[in-house]
Amino acid sequence: MSQTTFEHENWEAGSEQTTTTSSKIKAGLTLAQRTPMGIKKSSGEFSAWDPAASDGTEVATRITPFEIDTTAGASEKQLIKGGIFNPELINWPAGTTDAQKLTAFVGTPISLQTLY
């Protein structure tokens, strides 16, 4: 008899409950699961977090819980707004520094905790 091995991702890294909320996502995006998100001040729409921006998206406040496609137009989707997560499983933008990762969600109900 063969045995199946299961891989388990340790995405949730603490005992806090994960919370989500409906959020308007900007049109024209294809976002991977666990992408950090920021809100554009001028439109109130969420877009991928950009630490180099100055339009509001430089502050990470949400995370995509699944892949999101808004190529057909802006739409309301659930985004993670709180919980404790493994930073190694976040879909960080290319070039994100360790310092940016450490400070990405400061001041929000999202915490990052590395698992050992």
Image: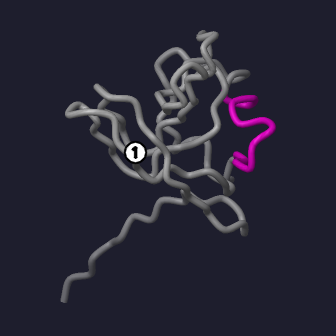
Name the amino acid type tagged 1.
Gln
Please provide percent x and percent y for residue 10: 55, 60
Residue at the right extreme, as displayed: 107
Q: Viewer-proximal residue, 10 or 12?
A: 12
Q: Residue at x 68, y 55 (%)?
A: 84
Other-residue count near label 1 (Cα within 10 Å), few / some / many at <14 / 14–19 / ≥20: some
Please provide percent x and percent y for residue 2: 20, 83
Please provide percent x and percent y for residue 109: 74, 50
Q: Residue at x 61, y 61 (%)?
A: 19
Figure check: 2 above or below 94: below
On screen, residue 22 versus residue 30, left or right, reads right
Residue bearing the label numbered 1 = 33
Give the image's coloring scheme. one colour
On screen, residue 42 versus residue 59, left or right, reads left
Q: Tell whether position 46 is magenta.
A: no
Residues in magenta? 101-113
Q: Residue at x 58, y 42 (%)?
A: 62
Please provide percent x and percent y for residue 50: 55, 19
